[in-house]
Image (spheres, rainbow, N blue to C red):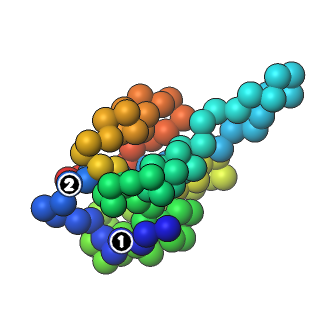
Amino acid sequence: MKIRNGFVSNSSSSSYVIAYRQSEPCPHCGRNDIDIMSIIEQSEDNGDGETSVAAVGYDAVMEHLKDWFDADDEIFEKIKELNDGTYNFGMVYISYSDTSLSGMLENNKSIKILHSGG
């Protein structure tokens, strides 16, 4: 896994801080919602070097963001509000050329985009 430090400017990817739900499999059919972090990691392994996972989990995301935001910025409040055990958190970079993956982030109802940047 490639680790980046902070939001990258002048790159060919967008950064996202997301809150996502890990669903339980359906007891009847076994179907589960998509695991967005696994999909991003698979894209990272296949790739162009621009899609990557920077941090996963509440503590890791909060620590990662401290280098880029003041503690009173609203991004920290958004994350704290959602930290009730329902959501997990991630900071990811998605290649501009990967429109299907960025579309998944933006259109999946179990994912909340808390911050995005170029």
Residue 65 position in % (x across, y down): 36, 69
Residue at (52, 51) in percent of width and height: 42
Q: Secondary structure at mark 2?
A: loop
Q: Which residue is mark 2?
A: 12
Residue toward you, 92 or 52: 52
Pointer 1: residues within 10 angstroms few (<14), some, or many (20+)?
A: some
Query: Would residue 30 be visible to someone looking at this image?
Result: yes
Asked if residue 36 is positioned above or below residue 10 in the image, the reply reads: above
Judged left or right of residue 22, residue 76 is: left
Residue farthest top in this picture: 28
Position of 17 relative to 113 (above/below):
below
Q: Position of residue 25 (x, y in %)?
A: 77, 34
Q: Position of residue 95 (x, y in %)?
A: 29, 49
Residue at 18 percent across and 60 percent down: it is 11
| Residues packed near mark 2 inside 10 Å, few (<14), some (14 to 19) or many (20 plus) | some
Left or right of 91 on screen, residue 60 = right
Amino acid type, residue under disc 2 in the picture: Ser
**What amino acid type is highlighted by mark number 1?**
Arg
On the image, the x and y values in percent for residue 117 come to 23, 53
Specify the farthest residue to the right.
Answer: 28
| Numbered marks: total | 2
Pick whichever of labels 2 and 1 is earlier in the sequence.
1
Taking the spot 43% from the left edge, 69% from the top edge, the residue there is 2
Q: Nearer the viewer, mark 2 or mark 1?
A: 2
Rendered image quadrant of residue 59: bottom right
Task: Name the image quarter holding residue 67.
Answer: bottom left
Query: Can residue 115 be seen here?
Result: no
Q: Nearer the viewer, residue 89 or 80?
A: 89
Q: CA distance from mark 2 to mark 1?
A: 14 Å
Taking the spot 48% from the left edge, 31% from the top edge, the residue there is 108
Residue that badge 1 annotates: 4
